[in-house]
Amino acid sequence: MKRHLIILVSLLFAAVSSFAADNSYLLNGNNEYESGNYDKAIEFYEKQLQTAESGALFYNLGNAYYKKGSLAPAILNYERALLREPDNDDIKANLEIARSKTIDDIKPKEKIFFAQWYDDFVNMNSSDNWAVCSIVLFLLTLTFAAIYLYIKIPAARRIGFFGGIGLFICTICCMCFASSQKTKLTAHNYVIIFNPSVEVKTAPEAKASKHCNLHEGTKVKLKQTRKQWIEIEIENGNSGWIQEGDARKI
Amino acid sequence: MKTLKAIALTFIFLLSTCLSAIAAEISFVAKAENVVTLGEKVLIMFTLNNAESDNINFPSLEGFKILYGPNKSTNSSMSIINGHREQSYSTTWTYYVTPEKEGTFTISPAKATVSGTVYRTNALTIKVIKGEDKPANSGNQNAQQNTTASISNDDVFLRTEISKSKVYEQEQFIATLKLYYRVNINSLEDYKLPEYKGFISQDIEVPNENKYGKENVNGKVYNTLILKQNVLIPQKSGQLDLGKGSVTALAQVQVNSQRGGWPFDGFFTQTRLVQKTLNIPNVSVNVQPLPDKNKPENFNGAVGSFQISSSKTPTEGYKTNEAITIKLKIQGSGNIKFAKAPKINFPEDFETYDPKIDNSIKASENGISGTKTIEYLAIPRYPGEYVIPAAEFSFFDVKTKSYKKLKTEEYKLTIEKGADVAASTVSNYTNKESVKYSDSDIKYINQKNYSLSPRNEYFYGSLAYALWFIIPLVLFVVVFFFLRKLAAENSNIALVKNKKANKLATKRFKAAKEHMDKDNKSGFYEEISKALYGYVSDKMNISATELTKNNVKTELSSHNVSEETTNEFIKMLDTCEFARFAPSAVSSSMQDIYNEAVDLVGKLENEITAVNLQK
């Protein structure tokens, strides 16, 4: 019994001990960016991305693309950075600037205020942070349970009981948030238009009639994929088909 | 000095006149009447202007018999206008010929070689018509003419000729209003020309040399004059009338004087002006509607025969915000002026303007023909690959009586980013809220955070994450059950002890009784005191070492044992202790003490159990 416990605990620490990635490419990329060699910086950042990632890495890569004048890759990388660090003001600001340079001005559907609040609240933390939160809250829940179980003072027991229930609910919420943030990262529900100008068709055929035109850097929702075509939903609610090569998943 | 200047001026003057004389244009022209009657004498002239040549090739005058010629004559003239001298001279060769048969003959150009350069005349076309049937008696004709002071309809009349009597809607044809006359016409007035209702009409300017002609109508040769020539395009189908009209002519009629015997009668004939209203008879045209069969969708009324071509400027190197012009040329004959410009569907990212249409159209005796040039101007706003689709033009071909579809070529363009694209894009979208950022630069890169995580690995849902829940929970549960078991075990010991307390006490009492029987006092008291202590210790769940008299007192009272019993119990303990160390000092017998102790334990038992039951 004791031996099993020791193995488990050591496993836990092994898993938690932070992933020590080689970040030399990131450092090189930053140096090149500082000296204004954006092309080389991009090269280094992209190489770093083959093995590891972080919000800061995507953000720096976005900056390098922006400085080079490539709007669509800049926006793509800012969006990816924002998914990993949803509450980073720098990323938000730069994404805003990059978006202001795009051609399409699509007004997003307005959300109901509490849906907006919920989104803002969930976006305060990344998936990993929410996960850590849930663990801390869970440990607190156990502590309160212990208080309830082993302390004989009635007031303490009451606090332990209700506090424990409250903390447990919070734990579940945090897990949900972590899950939803992770889904955003893994589901690739949005794409960025990469071609300077793309014809949105009404059906997944080259001969289909044109619905509208979209331009470089516009973010659209991905609905489904069929052969070489993807169905997209523009933020104002319209949908149509474009070719897969015209856009890239966030 | 003055004389020198004068000489220089004179020289310059002379030189300039020389130059001007040289500059006069050299030309070689042929002239003859267009229409002649058989047997008539025809004059053909070849004139060489402003040059002299000995090497001249005259064409063979086929179909004509040369009566006389060539006869060379020269002519020169000089004029001074504003001190500018102009000199011209010409040489004319003249032939007199007579046609040998009816028909249309072409005389090919004559060639003249002037200092190495060959000049050619125009070709001549001469139509030879049948001559008038000569009346047998010429005097008779004379008499006829003398007696009538008026003119008949045979002498002068108007007629409208149409080039086709059966046409399609929108198909052009020529209507020519001709005056036929055998008398001298002084003037024409009071024109009431047909209105050509239901047609679009376009006047043809007939050059003067083509206006006049000769025609043989019913054996009589008439001079003809084209009054009006129009291209007509019918706008509806059915039997259409061109309409009637009239023109008043003033004709000169020769009248012999009535005074007889005047010797100069033969020489002097009087002329009189006679007014005559000439009617223009109606002519009707059969207009067929255009067939519905195979009618193209984009047909917009062009009828005739056309060709289409397109070009684009610039031919390569396209950039955003730089204009591209597609030039479409529709060439041919027909109702080209009214044909609508075909539409070019430019890609949506092109800013387009209304096309510029330029008609260069000529109406001639062959109908309306010319070129319609349509310029489509478009400005690409965004870089990319674009296809400018072909323009389609369809028309009804009157020759094959079918619809024809023409297509220009499709253009594939690669638009590159122009220099000023960013600025214009921003300025185009000024009403976007976010533009306010455009003058501020992006925030600098993040240089604080160098920690990286493996790609596509997320803490949530990982094994580590699960373990963070599982291990504390397992630990908690394990500890919980461990503690509970401990507590359970503890409570069991106390209960057993409690239950056994009486039995143990009884055992001790038995031992004490044995000691009493042997009269072993110290042993007896020891057993009694052990029995009492043991009982309390077991009953109260207190270890024997912790047991003191004070302890016992508080413990007993806490178990609701009455004070009386407690005091008795303590007194008993005191007695036992005292007796152990000084047995003789104890007055009461062992039997009494034994009974008392057993009673006491019984009492305690009762009281404690009573309390427990109450609880």
Image: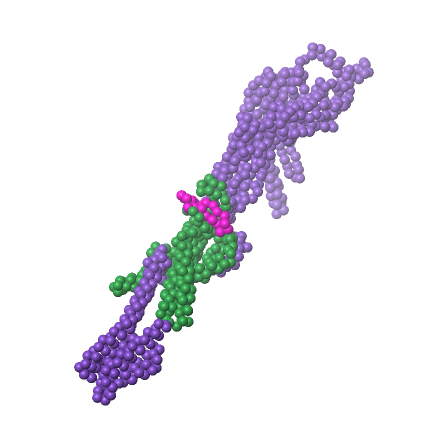
Chain colours: A green, B purple
Q: Quadrant of the N terminus of chain A?
A: bottom left
User: Magenta stretch?
Assistant: A225-244
Name the one closer to the observer, B477 or B5.
B477
Residue at left offset 21%, top offset 88%: B584
The answer to whether residue B476 is above or below residue B220 is below
**Residue furthest to the bottom:** B585
Instruction: Give the residue at the far right of this rendering.
Output: B259
Tell whether B538 sits left or right of B277.
Answer: left
The residue at 53%/53% (across/down) is: B429
**Can residue A226 be seen here?**
yes
Front residue (pair B56, B44): B44
- Secondary structure mainly formed by the magenta segment: strand
Q: Residue B258's spot in the image, x, y percent?
A: 81, 16
Q: Is residue A104 visible?
A: no
Q: Is residue B247 above or below residue B469?
A: above
Q: Position of residue A142 (x, y in %)?
A: 36, 65
Residue A220 horizontal/vertical position (percent): 46, 51
Instruction: Name which residue lies at 40% across and 71% down.
Output: A154
* Res. B134 image quadrant: top right
Q: Position of residue B567 (x, y in %)?
A: 32, 83
Q: Is residue B501 magenta?
A: no
